[in-house]
């Protein structure tokens, strides 16, 4: 029953979702909207699992004074500290808002900003002309980058249009090809799960 | 609870009496797909030959990556993307995680598995535990190695970067729905000297994987993983069905393009596909 029951639930809900999408009656009953609401509700409960896991892992790190344990301490203090503040004055209270807007958001933005530097270092490695593919990649990248920057148009009139054509036609066509293949993959995966052929999500990697 | 009468007011009348608006073609396409795959599965079950799946270098490289980590005595990092548990890419990652965990258990190599989504974490914990059990090494399973980091994208990113810097994995397997954090992970993986395998269908991230990872599974390749790894003929049948339909779609695109050139205003194929 450990595997059969989840498989049965998966199949029933999989078929129900298909019914809710394709058939008029399914849309009338609002099956998709109802299940969306269930997901939102269960998300609330799932947060507790995350808190428990973080507490167990980092609590053990602190307790056993494992390497880098002060980081774990910072995490526990930050997590429970913010939770306490938010419970005391709600998440929209002044301190909670200040912590979120003044600390969390800028840290997130700083992480995002790192991409620029990492793209540069990756580009340096990739564009070193070692193979034929790398050469093609570099030529295409130079054409596109200069075409998208104002300097390209200054150097050669019409460069921007060439770069834009490259993005809109060959790149777009390749991306759409990948997307079509991926969507078929989605369908095949969904079918394998609904039919109970793929059971990796129940543990291990064994098929039926 | 939703009121059907309220929905009825906004709902267009059914097509052919039963179908929702614009869902006839998806229904026919989906049904045809099920029939083709069913035929292939039946053939596979009956022991009749079905086409082989071509070699997928990215999946073959998983063994190499784990072997390298074992030789170096360093851990393997597996990230299932930052998508929800219902995301097909995340589901595709489950099969690969099971395989990676089993291999790591057999070779006694530490597997660090990080998660952004709490549901994905719960499923992955079960997969890893079960894989260690199947490998006959339940004692080697360490619950601390399957980690929930954070529900926020950049907090997850920061957490994983910290792990990679501190624990220096020799292999970094990124298999799933990845977004802006892709490049950061790959470059840090490169800095710590990890062999990197990436797989996603998010086209905006694919160039980053191609540029910075050692092996990349593009698009539908990642969905062939469970069939490829398990070598089950039944699962292979679904992948072959996928390929047959890709050829069918390609033919439809060619026909549609020709019809569009003949009469751009009255393309019958476009009309059928958009109306139904």
Image (spheres, grey):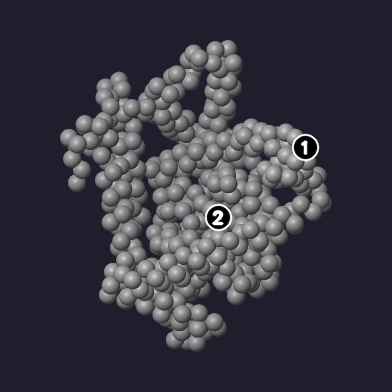
The residue that label 1 is drawn on is: A156
Name the residue rendered at 81%, 51% in the picture.
A129
The residue nearer to you, when weighing B21 against B146, is B21
Q: Position of residue B23 (x, y in %)?
A: 37, 28
Where is residue B75, by image quadrant?
Answer: bottom right
**In the rendered view, would you say B232 is above or below A68?**
above
Q: Position of residue A110 (x, y in %)?
A: 55, 65
> Could you tell me how far apart the alpha carbons at marks 1 and 2 are, in whole angstroms?
32 Å
> Label 2 is found on which chain of the structure?
B
Marks 1, 2 in one chain? no
> Label 1 is found on which chain of the structure?
A
**Element type at mark 1:** loop
Residue B71 shown left or right of residue A100 in the figure: right
- The answer to whether the residues at label 1 and label 2 have Cβ atoms under 8 Å apart is no
Where is residue A50, by image quadrant?
Answer: bottom left
On the question of residue A52 being in view, the answer is: no
Q: Position of residue B113 (x, y in %)?
A: 51, 65
> Which quadrant would the C terminus of chain B be assigned to in this image?
top left
Q: Position of residue B211 (x, y in %)?
A: 69, 52
**In the rendered view, would you say A187 is above or below B198?**
above
Residue A137 shown left or right of residue A116 in the figure: right
The residue nearer to you, when weighing A160 against A119, is A160
Viewer-nearest of discs 1 and 2: 1
Name the residue rendered at 76%, 52% in the picture.
A127
**In the rendered view, would you say B194 is above or below A19?**
below
The residue that label 2 is drawn on is: B180
The residue nearer to you, when weighing B29 against A128, is A128
Name the residue rendered at 26%, 45% in the picture.
A34
Residue B243 shown left or right of residue A186 in the figure: right
Name the residue rendered at 63%, 52% in the picture.
B209
């Amino acid at each position: 029953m450990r595997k059969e029951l989840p498989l049965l639930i998966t199949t029933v809900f999989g078929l129900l979702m298909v019914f809710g999408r394709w058939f008029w009656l399914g849309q009338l009953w609002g099956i998709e909207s109802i299940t969306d609401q269930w997901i939102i509700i269960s998300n609330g409960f799932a947060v507790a699992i995350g808190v428990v896991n973080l507490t167990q892992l980092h609590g053990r790190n602190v307790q056993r004074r494992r390497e880098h344990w002060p980081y774990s301490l910072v995490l526990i203090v930050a997590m429970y500290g913010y939770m306490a503040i938010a419970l005391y004055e709600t998440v929209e209270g002044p301190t909670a808002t200040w912590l979120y807007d003044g600390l969390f958001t800028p840290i997130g933005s700083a992480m995002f900003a790192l991409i620029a530097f990492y793209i540069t270092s990756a580009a340096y490695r990739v564009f070193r002309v070692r193979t034929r593919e790398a050469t093609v990649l570099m030529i295409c990248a130079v054409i596109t980058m200069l075409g998208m920057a104002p300097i390209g148009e200054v150097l050669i009139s019409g460069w921007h249009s060439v770069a834009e054509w490259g993005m809109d036609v060959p790149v777009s066509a390749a991306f759409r090809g990948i997307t079509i293949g991926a969507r078929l993959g989605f369908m095949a995966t969904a079918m394998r799960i609904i039919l109970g052929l793929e059971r990796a999500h129940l543990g291990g990697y064994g098929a039926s | 609870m939703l009121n059907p009468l309220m929905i009825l007011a906004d709902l267009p009348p059914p097509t052919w009496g039963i179908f929702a608006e614009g869902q006839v073609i998806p229904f026919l396409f989906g049904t045809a797909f099920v029939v083709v795959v069913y035929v292939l599965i039946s053939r596979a079950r009956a022991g009749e030959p079905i086409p082989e799946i071509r070699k997928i270098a990215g999946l073959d490289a998983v063994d190499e990556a784990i072997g390298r980590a074992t030789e170096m005595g360093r851990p393997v990092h597996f990230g299932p993307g930052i998508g929800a548990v219902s995301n097909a890419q995340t589901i595709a990652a489950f099969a690969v995680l099971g395989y990676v965990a089993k291999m790591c258990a057999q070779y006694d190599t530490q597997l660090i598995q990080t998660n952004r989504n709490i549901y994905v974490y719960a499923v992955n914990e079960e997969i890893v535990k079960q894989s260690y059990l199947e490998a006959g090494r339940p004692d080697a399973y360490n619950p601390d190695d399957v980690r929930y980091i954070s529900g926020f994208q950049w907090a997850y990113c920061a957490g994983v970067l910290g792990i990679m810097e501190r624990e220096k994995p020799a292999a970094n397997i990124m298999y799933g729905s990845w977004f802006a954090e892709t490049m950061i992970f790959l470059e840090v993986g490169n800095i710590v000297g990890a062999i990197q395998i990436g797989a996603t269908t998010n086209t905006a991230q694919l160039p980053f994987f191609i540029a910075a990872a050692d092996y990349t599974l593009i698009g539908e390749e990642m969905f062939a993983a469970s069939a490829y790894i398990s070598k089950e003929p039944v699962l292979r049948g679904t992948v072959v069905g996928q390929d047959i339909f890709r050829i069918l779609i390609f033919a439809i695109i060619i026909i549609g393009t020709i019809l569009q050139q003949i009469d751009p205003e009255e393309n019958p194929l476009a009309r059928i596909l958009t109306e139904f």
